[in-house]
Each structure stands twice: as C-alpha cells, then as structure tokens.
Amino acid sequence: MPAPDLIPIAREPGYRTDTIGRYADGQFYAAVHGVRRDDDHEPDMGRERIRWYAYLHLFDADGRHRRSEISLIGIAPNLRGELGEQAERRLTALLDQLSDRQFTDVSIRPFHMLYDGVTFGLIDESDVERGDWVELYPDGLGFSEPWDGLYST
C-alpha cells in the first residue's frame, strides 16, 4: 500500500507528539527539537553543534501546510537549565497564539522546507528497500503501514 495523501499522526500525551492538534483555522504540529545542520557531517562526540529549535507548523483543515514559525533557541549539547526554560517559554508562546486549541491526533500532507540549513517537513521516503515510509524532520519520526498514526524512531 503506497503512502496515503494524508498521513495520520497520533497524539501521545507526555511524549514526542504531545503538542499537536487542531485549532480554529486548521491543524498544528509544535515541538522543540535539537539537530545539526543538514550539511554538518563532521564528528561531534560532545554534541557541541546541536541546534535547538522551537517550531510550529500550521496546516489547513485538509492537512495542507500553510506556514511555519521556527526559532533557534540556542546551540548546546543538551536542553537544560536556562536554555530548556527558554525553549519551553517559546513553545508556550507559539501554542498560545492558537485560538480554540485542542490537543488531538492530526492528519497532514507531506511538505518540505529548509530553515537555517535544517530540513523541516513530512517527507515521503518510500523506496524498494525501505518500502512505503514517510519521515518527519527534524524529529526523526517515521510513519508506515498500517498508517495508524503511530511512529517509529
């Protein structure tokens, strides 16, 4: 079964998909995640080049990507202390702008964008070797059959 046009993403309270849902104008996916730039392939054993982003992707009711708000919080090995608090404040501010917000499952269409040298999006990576597979970036969540919204990491 090929990847569907709409990829379901199940909300998992208290975990990686905790801050997704619907709002007055459609659907949203919000998160904080640390990642290196796409072109950064050098060893980084101390994780010194991890870039922490807070982001909010907005979609219409049919799952089409409308726009994204992405903020670089800082560069550090871990999201702790003041950096962690700053990330939580930014994520809260992003979510607070959504009227009639409800945390729930979503269904969105693949999209792709580049911000600050980092890929963000839901990208169909289906091929013969892997099979039907859609990956959420930079979160590293993979979706496949039975397309029930559950993910692999």
Image (cartoon, rainbow, N blue to C red):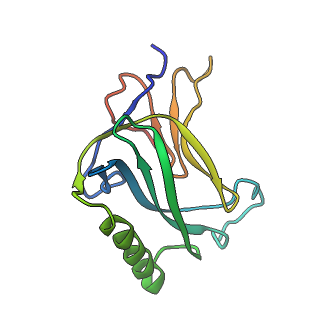
In this orientation, which residue lies closer to the viewer: 14 or 95? 95
In this orientation, which residue lies closer to the viewer: 58 or 21? 58
In this orientation, which residue lies closer to the viewer: 142 or 42? 142
Which of the 4 image quadrants contains residue 111?
A: top right
Residue 11 percent across, percent down from the top left = 28, 46
Point out the residue furthest to the top here. Answer: 1
Q: Residue at x 52, y 38 (%)?
A: 135
Residue 36 percent across, percent down from the top left = 65, 61
Instruction: State left or right for residue 145 relative to residue 25.
Output: right
Residue 46, compared with residue 57, is above or below; it is below
Residue 73, compared with residue 120, is above or below; it is below
Instruction: State left or right for residue 118 relative to residue 57.
Output: right
In this orientation, which residue lies closer to the viewer: 65 or 86? 65
Q: Residue at x 44, y 22 (%)?
A: 4
Residue 66 percent across, percent down from the top left = 48, 47
Instruction: State left or right for residue 91 relative to residue 50.
Output: left
Q: Residue at x 38, y 78 (%)?
A: 89
Total numbered badges shown on the rendered structure: 0
Instruction: State left or right for residue 23 relative to residue 93.
Output: left
Point out the residue furthest to the front here. Answer: 25
Which of the 4 image quadrants contains residue 86?
A: bottom left
Q: Residue at x 26, y 58 (%)?
A: 14
Point out the residue furthest to the bottom here. Answer: 82
Residue 146, compared with residue 68, is above or below; it is above
Position of the N terminus, as image quadrant, is: top left
Residue 90 percent across, percent down from the top left = 42, 74
